[in-house]
Image (cartoon, helix red, strand yellow):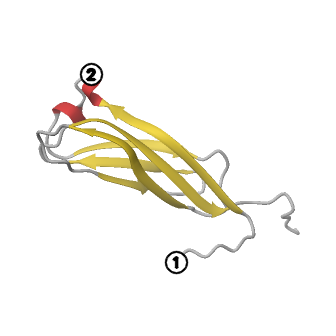
């Protein structure tokens, strides 16, 4: 369980079109086997410690003739940002994907100050 030590909770969110591979015969649309897409997300301002990041698919367009396999996660989460990672495998063909994310964590307050 993540316990916040501050009275200041910061929440930041975003939405990203990860790829649209059917438009240019990209690897998610034409490839097979293990495939991965990564996007670095930077926060507008840093958190005091690594926040909790939740990611979800907000739009997906899969070929209906193949198995629909997807794994989406946040990796390398730190105070400045994270890597949004989308993976698929096998014969899955993905035309496009959009992901939404939200980060929760402690932030500084203008009333916070440190002696010495």
Residue 90 percent coordinates (x, y)? 13, 47
Label 2, residues with CA under 10 Å away: few <14, some 14-19, many ≥20: few
Question: Dot 1 lies on which element?
Answer: loop
Residue 18 percent coordinates (x, y)? 39, 37
Residue sitting at 16 percent across and 39 percent down? Answer: 64
**Residue 93 vs residue 37: left or right?**
left
**Front position in the image: 93 or 106:** 93
Residue 33 percent coordinates (x, y)? 14, 44
What is the quadrant of the C terminus in the image? bottom right
Question: Dot 2 lies on which element?
Answer: loop
Residue underneath mark 2: 24
Residue 46 percent coordinates (x, y)? 66, 53
**Residue 49 vs residue 35: left or right?**
right
Q: Quadrant of residue 51?
A: bottom right
Q: Earlier in the sequence, mark 1 or mark 2?
A: 1
Residue underneath mark 1: 1
């Amino acid at each position: 369980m993540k316990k916040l030590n501050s009275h200041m909770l910061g929440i930041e969110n975003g939405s990203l079109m990860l790829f649209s591979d059917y438009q240019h015969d990209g690897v998610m649309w034409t490839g097979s086997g293990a495939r991965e897409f990564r996007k670095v997300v930077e926060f507008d301002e840093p958190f005091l410690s690594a926040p909790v990041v939740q990611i979800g698919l907000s739009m997906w367009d899969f070929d209906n003739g193949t198995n629909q396999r997807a794994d989406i996660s946040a990796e390398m989460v730190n105070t400045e940002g994270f890597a949004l990672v989308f993976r698929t495998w096998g014969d899955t063909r993905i035309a496009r994907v959009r992901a939404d994310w939200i980060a929760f964590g402690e932030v500084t307050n203008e009333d916070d100050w440190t002696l010495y």
